[in-house]
Amino acid sequence: MQLRSRIQHLEGDTMTNLLPTVRISRLIIVFILVGLAAYFSYAYPVELFFGIGFSCGAALILLTSQLLGWRAGLLMLVLVHGAILCFMPPSSAFLLHTGELVIAMALVSRWPRLGLIGASALYWLCIGIPMQLFIQFDAGRPTQETLFFTYAVMASGLGNALVAEFAAVYGRAGMLFGHAKQGQVVTLRISRALLHLTLAAMLGSSMLFFISGGHTFKQNMMRDLSRQASQSALTLELGFKAMSKAERRGLRLNGYLERAAAHNLIRNVLSSAPYEAILTSHDGRQLLNVSNGTAPMKQWHSLIARQEYGSLHGQTWSPEPSRPELAGAQWTKMSYIYSVYMDGFILHVRLPLDTYRNEMYGVYAAQLVSSLYISVIFGLFALFIHRFLVRAVHRLALVSGGIPDKVKEGVAPMWPQSKLEEINWLVGNFRVVTEKLSSMFMESREQAYYDSLTGLPNRLHFNEHLQNAVGQAKRQGQEVYVMFVDLDRFKHINDTLGHTVGDLLLEQVAVRLSRDLDPHMFMARLGGDEFVLVLIAEEEKARTLAIELLADLENPFHIGGEELYVTASIGIGSSAISGYEAETIVKNADFAMYDSKAIGGNGYCFFTPPTTDLSHRMRLEFELRKAVDRQQLMLHYMPIYDRESERVISLEALLRWTHPEQGLVSPGLFIPMAESCGLLKPIGEWVAREACRQIKEWQNNGEAAVPVAINLSPTQIQLYGIVDYLEQLLTETGIPPELLEVEITEEVFAKHPERVIAELHRLKQRGVKVWIDDFGTGYSSLGLLNRMPVDGFKIDRTFVHGLEEDTDKLSIIHTMMLLAQARNWLVVAEGVETNGEAAALKAAGCCLQQGYYYSKALPAQKVSKWFGREGR
């Protein structure tokens, strides 16, 4: 199984490493295939009409730049266009389209929102059309022909950009290049989709008109030329038949008179239009060359000499260009060619089609006007859609953007109106949703920022206001004061008269305190009987306000027919001493409030840095009250080691307090402090819950957890019902009771021993072990010792220190071991620090030992190393 798991792991790693390589290989293959498709599209364009063809090579290059970046597009442009320039002479249109690709990719990489169509249109408007017009006029082209070819070249460029955007946005080209996942939707704006639709309609309609018009014109032209060729061929055949054999023989021998007669015959028959005719013998020898209205064409002569003419009979033909030409230049050199076979002679005739140019461009001009009419109609339709639909939706999107922030700031959106009823319905729905959201926000703001009992701002609102006040005071060079107001003996009123009376009292206190505030002052209730005020003022103003607040509270409160007298303790913190740190000012105001309570209450104190141990202790006590909420308390665990089995058998949970400023605080300092100020109950419950939680976590992690012992004080057992709490914890967490142990001191039996014994019996019945801690140093009697429901005791460290050299201590240890054997108790020796002490204890029969010799108390994450450990 391990081998199979290892193989699967290696296969998974291999596949993970291969994925980037496979993706790169796929991109390279797709790049090559797209490049080849672009090259062949340029090399073999689709001929739409005379002299004009369409190629989608530019669209493929633009699509590559759109999906793989401008660098990949530029690389494909160099490779494809470089190959075209190497193998065939380019036309002026090809060079213009090359410039279009470079400029369009550069513009889109810099301004992506421009899009391929926008970049292409910008190129043709600023560069392409002016250059095309200049080239055409410089070549002496007629105006009608120049405008037509300019439009055709521009339409070809825009068409390629449109095809590329269509493929990128609406097609699956992104999946081909690995840039889109199955089901992923490419979003676009309505205006962009409308532009695509309008441009597709314009270019598509003009292309259809040109194709249909060109096809019709070509059919008519070819029919007319074929008719002329048939008539001329018949007349020439009759003329040559009328020649005598001697005349035909003289013609073959290049006789002057015979050639003149043949020349006149050909001229008379073909004189109705420009032509070039070459008379050859059957063996291909040229006998006569006759032309009228056109210059001889050497490539045609070569074609006849090579006898490659037969397949072109009755077809149009144009010579291959030897250098870059203008768009449509090939049309000016195109000819209709046919052959006339006569007795022993072949007459090759070439009729230039240049005579049809004006007629052809007249047809194309009419088609162009028709397409422009349709384009105008589509443009007006798109303008109508944009005016009444797209703009309305766009305005609605702008207004509805950031509605939660607008509602939070109390800004009412200016909803747009439209002439379309459906848009107005949508606006109405947005308005209703916004109003309900505003109402819900105001309600939630009331709940989140204001106290439900008094209506005053709460802690969250106070924190935000204080941050703003501190910033304002710092900018203006003023001081900010925070005043903590805490009612004296309010807990006593709550406990004796009930929470209802307490709530009514807090409401009246809030009203009375608010009466003394200026408009620029801020007051909040933090919870319970704590109120806080914020003001930007001088120290004397803060002092005067504190005196006024205390004076207002001197008058009795009338609640339910009773007169209640309440005093308060006020602590004042300021930025003058605490700096412009809101948290520090609040903490120091809290310190000052406890200082005020410490001197008897019903007064106020300004915060001053601690100068005596007493004030330091009081502030440490204040910090301890909030240590649990701030997660500053934690448990460390000290192992109990069995020297006989050489393993850890249990752990003792020890409480630690990490103060944010003072670091680790000694348990000997803060535990008595917790007991004296009434914090022992919440801290003790936290210790028990945290220990149970940690045991459960170790179990869930599969650790071989050992029992964990927690320390209980006499106060916890006698007053706070800790046993009930432990039973509840065991039920909630579901941990086995044998994994939880408690340690008590002998003092627990000093008061109400019967009650304590009963509580301990309850724990024993649940399966929880009970230990006596610090045995031999506290209060106990032999009679009471006999009744204690415990499982063992822990020898205090005072009996262990220097044990191997102290015979008196050793004899006491032996006596304790005899007592334990008689009662069948377990014994643990605490404070073992040396090997000599450990060996002496083992020799005395005490194998369960605890101390720094084995380990200090460790945090939970480091304790699991002891589970199941053998040997030290």
Image: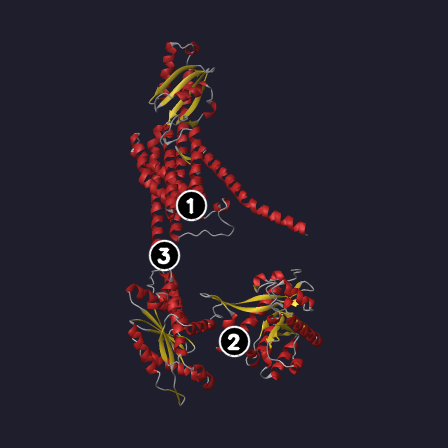
Seen at 36% across and 64% down, the residue is: 406
Q: Is residue 579 shown left or right of residue 842? A: left
In-front residue for pair 228/93: 93
Judge the density around disc 1: few (<14), some (14-19), many (≥20) Cα neighbours within 10 Å: many
Check disc 2 and report the residue beneath it. Answer: 680
Above or below, 334 against 11 in this view is above
State left or right for residue 801 relative to residue 620. Answer: right
Distance of mark 3 from mark 1, alpha carbons?
22 Å
Asked if residue 702 can be seen in this view, the reply is no
Residue that mark 1 sits on: 165
- Residue 6 position (above or below residue 61): below
Pointer 3 residue: 394
Q: Nearer the viewer, mark 1 or mark 2?
A: 2
Apparent side of residue 557 relative to residue 871 in the rendered image (left or right): left
Q: Label 1 is placed on what type of residue?
A: Glu
Q: Quadrant of residue 856?
A: bottom right
**Considering the numbered disc 2 on the image, is that residue within a helix, a strand or a loop?**
helix
Q: Earlier in the sequence, mark 3 or mark 2?
A: 3
> Which amino acid type is shown beneath numbered disc 3?
His
Location of residue 657 in the rendering, given as x and y in whole percent from the top left corner: 50, 68
Counting residues from the start of the chain, the first of labels 1 and 2 encountered is: 1
Task: Kindly indicate the quadrant of the structure image that contains residue 737.
Answer: bottom right
The residue closer to the viewer here, 256 or 11, is 11
Q: Residue at x 54, y 74 (%)?
A: 684
Q: Which of the two discs, 3 and 2, sits closer to the camera?
A: 2
Q: Secondary structure at mark 3?
A: helix
Farthest residue toward the bottom?
Answer: 561
Which sits earlier in the primary sequence, circle 3 or circle 1?
A: 1
Labelled pair 3, 2 in contact (Cβ < 8 Å): no
